[in-house]
Each structure stands twice: as structure tokens, then as C-alpha cells.
Image (spheres, rainbow, N blue to C red):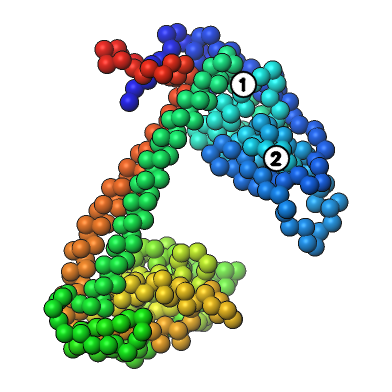
């Protein structure tokens, strides 16, 4: 979709913007905004989050263990419509317009618009400065300090100044167009979530019911598994595999890490699904002197700690390596178990594993080697396990392909959203009129 451009442009004198419409002005930030110097009210909400250009505030924040004097030193009042810049996170886009009155800590710069300036337009402009890397380069490249971007930096920056009605037109246009893109992105994200649910349901069904819908069934004796094919057995994982936990060699001991050639895996590697290589390496000396555990090709590794999505995830190791204390290795010792069948079985039980490992007590939010050993495993004959694995792979291929395509389309929409905002706030497209580029005109 193409949009009209302005008929005349001029050099803005701003390196990261280039040309701007010829009727726009250029001003420093201090002529467009004033730094707020307000005393906060005791019951004001406090700035808590930035979301796509809007600064939200929260009331009733926790005060236990702190005196008001300690907490309120340097705090300042925020008013609805202020442009709020987070000094340390501005480079990542933490810039927005306050949606209500409140207060904030000294890490924020609260900028009051003057003479009818549209804060919403400048919030998008400064966020564009962050996406282009300008703020980060200003802080790190020129000043060689932290990435702080405070009022002192903002007030001296040259910024484009469209006419006031144009600032509002740009704001209205972007509100409308980004809402459309966001709706499309949300729909695609919902579709991916649905595909993941279907994918998980497919795995769960096949590894507990098999491939033959007409096979005679029996009660598995395990309530949450239900019926399984009559000719299947079941065993606990501790009876078909050796289960071990790893460790992290002392980071300060150079002899454990310097020049290391032995792969060492942390819990993030389970997201690879098939672990082809390590990202970190330890020495032979570390292997001998610490309690790291070796893993071999076709061993499974499971993440056993954490409150994020990693805990309970499983991967198949395809290389020789060692593991840290946040992983367990499952080394199959029985010739009756196909490694990928066990992988799919554990994958199908992800939600249950997460639920059971989140109970009260000392193991809250963690899985132990004992827990893993006690997991039950339905046991089809080995040849049937191979057929199940191949069938699951074929069926999952369709879901994975759809998810990859949808994820790629989301990335393209996000790129388009960023490009559209940048083009509008820097005057590369003319959004004063609702009409877009006519078919018979080159834009």
C-alpha cells in the first residue's frame, strides 16, 4: 500500500532524518517542551510501564519496609499528556505519553508540551530515534558512557516541527493504521497459539492411543493417561534409563574454562530441540574435578528449574557434552525404548510436568531426578514406537510449516509498522488526507 508524498522537501540538518517537507521547521527540544518540576502528591499513582507510546500508572504500590522519605526523594509529579522518557531504557523505546496524573522517580524525564505541541507525535518521533539506533549511538558512541538519555540530551536535540494541525493529523493516522496492523498481528498470534495446542494434542493422542483407531484398548491403571492399546505395557523411566544432574564449574577458576574443548550446556539449550553443538566449553580438568555430568549423542536433557517456559522442556542431544545443575540427562539403557518416542512422550506431558513441579514445598518451581525417574512411560513394542515416531514427524511437519509461515508474516507486519511510523513522523509520506496514492500517480 503506497501513500502520497509531499511536493517539496528541504534538508533538515538532522543526520538521521535527512529531508523534511519544506514548510516544516526544525527546533531544539527545549523550545517544544519544558522539564516538569512538580512536587508529587502522596496518593498519586506511580509510572510503571510503557506500552506502544502510552505510559501507564499504578496506584497502591507496596510500601512495606520503606519510609516515605526514602522512597519519595527526587520523585516528581506527572500530569496527563506529559512526554515521559526513561533515561536508561529510552534507547529501547521506553518513551511515551502519560495517560493520567501521577508521579515518577528521578530516572524519568517528564516533559511538558508548550504552545499546543502534540506530545503523542513527539513520543512516536523519539521512539523512532530509538529504533534507528540514534539514541544508543548518542549515548555510547559520542559520549562513551551509559545509555542514559535524559532531559539534558533531549532539550538540545534538533527535532522536526510540523504545523500543529499536521502533528495531530500524523498522530490520528498512526493511531488508525497501527491499530489495523496490531489487529492483524494479534489474529496471527492467536492462530499460532491454536496451532501449538493442536500440535500438542496430536502428540499426546498418538503416544497414548497409538496409530490404529480400531485396536482393542485397556485401562492403563494411570488415571490421567486413561486407556491404552491392549498389547502395550508401561514402565517407570528409572527402569529404562539412567538419570543424572549436572553442575557449573567455578567461573573464577581459569583452569576449568580457559581453552576448554568439552561442550557445556545450560538450560536454554533445550529450546534447540535437537542440540547439535555447545555454546560454552570447559576443560578436561573441570570434567575430572567437578560434578559436571557427561551426556552422549541420543541422550535426552530436560530443564528442571525456573518459572518461565523452559522448565519441563526436553531436547535430544546429538553431540558429546556436559550439563549444568539446571538440567537432567536421561540416558536410555533399555533396548526396548526408542529415544524419539520417549522424547515425544515427555513433550506430550509438558503441562503436567510443569503443574506437578509447581507444588508447595522445597521443590516448588523445580523438578528432581527422582521425579523424572518416577514418570510412567507407556510401552508399545519397539517397532511400533518407530512407526509412531515417523507418523508424528510427518504430521508435525505441516503444523511447523504453518507456524513458520505465520511467524514470518508477523515479522513482516512488525517491520511495516515500524517503517510506517518512521515515514509519517519524519515527513516521508503525507498523511494529511485520507486518500492514498492514486493508481495513476507515482508516489
Instruction: Name the residue rendered at 59%, 16% in the picture.
Output: 164
Quadrant of residue 103 in the image? top right
Res. 260 in view: no
Instruction: Name the residue rendered at 41%, 40% in the picture.
Output: 183
Front residue of 358 and 33: 358
Q: What kind of element bears circle 2?
A: strand
| Residue 91 x %, y % | 58, 39
The correct choice, above or below, for 389 with respect to 220 in the image is above
| Residue 178 x %, y % | 45, 33
Give the Cα separation between the discs numbered 2 and 1: 21 Å
Say the numbered circle drawn on residue 70: none
For label 2, the residue is 108
N-terminal-most mark, 2 or 1: 2
The correct choice, above or below, for 16 with respect to 279 in the image is above
For label 1, the residue is 158
**Quadrant of the drawing holding the N terminus:** top left
Quadrant of residue 410 in the image? top left
Residue furthest bottom as drawn: 239
Instruction: Name the residue rendered at 21%, 57% in the picture.
Output: 398
The correct choice, above or below, for 287 with respect to 42 in the image is below
Circle 1 packing at 10 Å, graded few (<14), some (14-19), many (20+), is some
Front residue of 172 and 71: 172
Instruction: Name the residue rendered at 60%, 36% in the picture.
Output: 96
Left or right for 435, reference 308: left
| Residue 161 x %, y % | 59, 17
Q: What kind of element bears circle 1?
A: strand
Res. 191 in view: yes
Circle 2 packing at 10 Å, graded few (<14), some (14-19), many (20+), is many
Q: How many numbered tags mark residues here?
A: 2
Q: Nearer the viewer, mark 2 or mark 1?
A: 2
Amino acid at each position: 500500500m503506497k501513500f502520497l508524498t509531499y511536493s517539496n522537501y528541504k534538508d533538515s540538518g538532522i543526520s538521521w532524518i535527512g529531508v523534511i517537507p519544506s514548510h516544516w521547521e526544525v527546533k531544539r527540544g527545549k523550545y517544544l517542551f519544558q522539564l516538569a518540576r512538580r512536587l508529587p502528591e502522596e496518593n498519586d499513582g506511580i509510572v510503571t510501564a510503557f506500552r506502544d507510546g502510552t505510559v501507564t500508572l499504578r496506584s497502591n504500590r507496596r510500601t512495606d519496609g520503606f519510609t516515605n522519605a526514602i522512597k519519595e526523594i527526587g520523585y516528581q509529579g506527572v500530569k496527563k499528556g506529559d512526554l515521559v522518557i526513561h533515561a536508561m531504557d529510552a534507547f529501547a523505546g521506553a518513551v511515551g505519553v502519560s495517560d493520567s496524573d501521577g508521579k515518577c522517580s528521578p530516572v524519568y524525564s517528564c516533559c511538558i508540551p508548550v504552545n499546543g505541541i502534540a506530545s503523542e507525535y513527539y513520543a512516536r518521533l523519539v521512539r523512532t530515534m530509538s529504533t534507528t539506533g540514534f539514541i544508543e549511538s548518542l549515548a555510547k558512541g559520542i559520549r562513551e558512557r551509559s545509555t542514559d538519555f535524559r532531559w539534558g540530551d533531549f532539550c538540545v536535540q534538533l527535532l522536526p516541527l510540523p504545523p500543529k494541525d499536521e502533528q495531530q493529523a500524523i498522530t490520528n493516522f498512526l493511531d488508525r493504521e497501527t491499530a489495523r496492523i496490531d489487529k492483524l498481528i494479534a489474529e496471527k498470534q492467536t492462530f499460532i497459539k491454536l496451532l501449538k495446542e493442536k500440535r500438542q494434542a496430536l502428540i499426546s493422542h498418538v503416544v497414548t492411543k497409538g496409530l490404529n483407531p480400531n485396536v482393542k484398548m485397556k485401562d492403563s491403571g494411570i488415571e490421567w493417561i486413561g486407556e491404552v492399546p491392549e498389547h502395550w505395557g508401561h514402565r517407570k523411566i528409572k527402569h529404562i534409563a539412567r538419570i543424572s544432574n549436572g553442575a557449573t564449574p567455578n567461573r573464577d577458576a581459569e583452569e576449568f574454562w580457559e581453552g576448554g574443548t568439552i561442550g557445556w550446556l545450560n538450560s536454554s539449550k533445550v529450546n534447540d530441540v535437537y542440540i547439535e553443538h555447545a555454546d560454552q566449553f570447559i576443560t578436561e580438568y573441570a570434567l575430572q574435578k567437578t560434578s559436571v555430568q557427561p551426556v552422549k549423542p541420543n541422550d535426552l536433557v530436560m530443564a528442571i528449574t525456573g518459572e518461565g517456559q523452559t522448565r519441563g522442556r526436553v531436547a535430544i542431544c546429538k553431540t558429546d557434552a556436559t550439563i549444568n545443575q539446571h538440567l537432567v540427562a536421561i540416558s536410555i539403557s533399555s533396548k526396548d525404548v526408542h529415544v524419539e518416542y520417549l522424547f515425544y512422550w515427555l513433550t506430550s506431558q509438558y503441562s503436567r510436568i510443569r503443574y506437578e513441579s509447581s507444588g508447595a514445598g522445597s521443590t516448588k518451581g523445580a523438578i528432581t531426578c527422582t521425579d523424572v525417574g518416577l514418570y510412567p512411560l507407556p510401552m508399545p513394542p519397539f517397532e511400533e514406537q518407530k512407526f509412531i515416531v515417523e507418523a508424528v514427524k510427518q504430521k508435525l511437519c505441516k503444523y511447523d510449516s504453518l507456524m513458520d509461515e505465520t511467524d514470518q508474516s508477523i515479522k513482516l507486519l512488525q517491520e511495516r509498522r515500524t517503517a510506517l511510523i518512521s515515514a509519517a513522523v519524519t515527513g516521508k509520506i503525507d498523511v494529511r488526507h485520507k486518500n492514498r496514492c492514486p493508481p495513476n500517480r507515482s508516489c
